[in-house]
Image (spheres, rainbow, N blue to C red):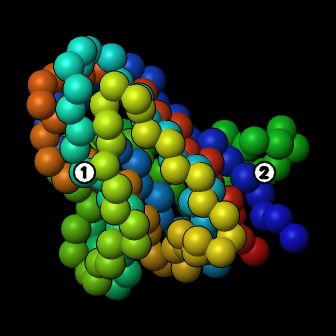
């Protein structure tokens, strides 16, 4: 049975340094699964790419800072408020605790980035864990970026 699904988005944010594009922290009573991650940019007109990674954190981690808290929006209008915490564009990334990179890829800036995960991909944060989708190096120049994520609460 599918859990409750939420979107988390940011629009037209200036980016010139490494950052957690998104981070999601599960509560003590609920696990979460990342179902989709997408980011795009405006400003860079020459081909370039940088690494991105999704990292799972557990045990004594600290949320990133420098960005903002984002309120998840129910994908189905009748769902209650999300129980997880979402952040976007933290220029000081999530840190501490135990971290494991669960997937790594490259973002070709001119093409945008889209990752769609199925249940078998297991991009899950168990209760009291977190996932951070990070641009771990600075972009080649200042960009204007937008992004969205689709997150499922597993109960």
Residue highlighted by disc 1: 51
Q: What number is the disc on residue 80?
A: 2
User: Residue 84 location, x and y as percent?
Assistant: 57, 60
Mark found first going from the N terminus, 2 or 1: 1
**Total tally of numbered discs in the picture:** 2
Identify the secondary structure beneath mark 2: loop
- Residue at the front extreme of this rendering: 47
Q: Specify whether 121 is left or right of 74.
A: left
Q: Specify whether 120 is left or right of 46.
A: right
User: Residue 141 location, x and y as percent?
Assistant: 12, 25
Residue depicted at 13% across the width and 40% down the height: 138
Q: Specify whether 34 is left or right of 136.
A: right
Residue depicted at 34% across the width and 56% down the height: 105
Few, some or many C-alpha atoms within 10 Å of disc 2 (few <14, some 14-19, many ≥20)?
Answer: few
Residue depicted at 14% across the width and 48% down the height: 137
On the image, which quarter does residue 61 sit in?
Answer: bottom left
User: Residue 122 location, x and y as percent?
Assistant: 58, 74
Identify the secondary structure beneath mark 1: strand
Q: Give 101 or 86, whichever is nearer the viewer.
A: 101
Q: Quadrant of the C terminus?
A: bottom right
Q: CA distance from mark 2 to mark 1?
A: 35 Å
């Amino acid at each position: 049975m599918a859990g409750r699904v939420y979107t988390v988005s940011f629009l037209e944010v200036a980016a010139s340094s490494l950052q957690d594009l998104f981070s999601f922290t599960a509560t003590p009573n609920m696990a979460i699964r990342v179902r989709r991650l997408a980011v795009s940019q405006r400003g860079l007109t020459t081909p370039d790419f940088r690494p991105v990674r999704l990292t799972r954190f557990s045990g004594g981690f600290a949320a990133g800072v420098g960005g903002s808290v984002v309120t998840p929006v129910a994908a189905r209008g009748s769902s209650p408020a999300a129980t997880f915490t979402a952040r976007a564009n933290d220029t000081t990334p999530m840190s501490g605790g135990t971290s494991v990179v669960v997937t790594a890829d490259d973002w070709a800036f001119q093409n945008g980035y889209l990752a769609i995960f199925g249940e078998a991909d297991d991009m899950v944060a168990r209760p009291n864990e977190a996932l951070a989708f990070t641009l771990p190096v600075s972009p080649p120049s200042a960009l204007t970026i937008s992004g969205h994520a689709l997150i499922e609460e597993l109960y």
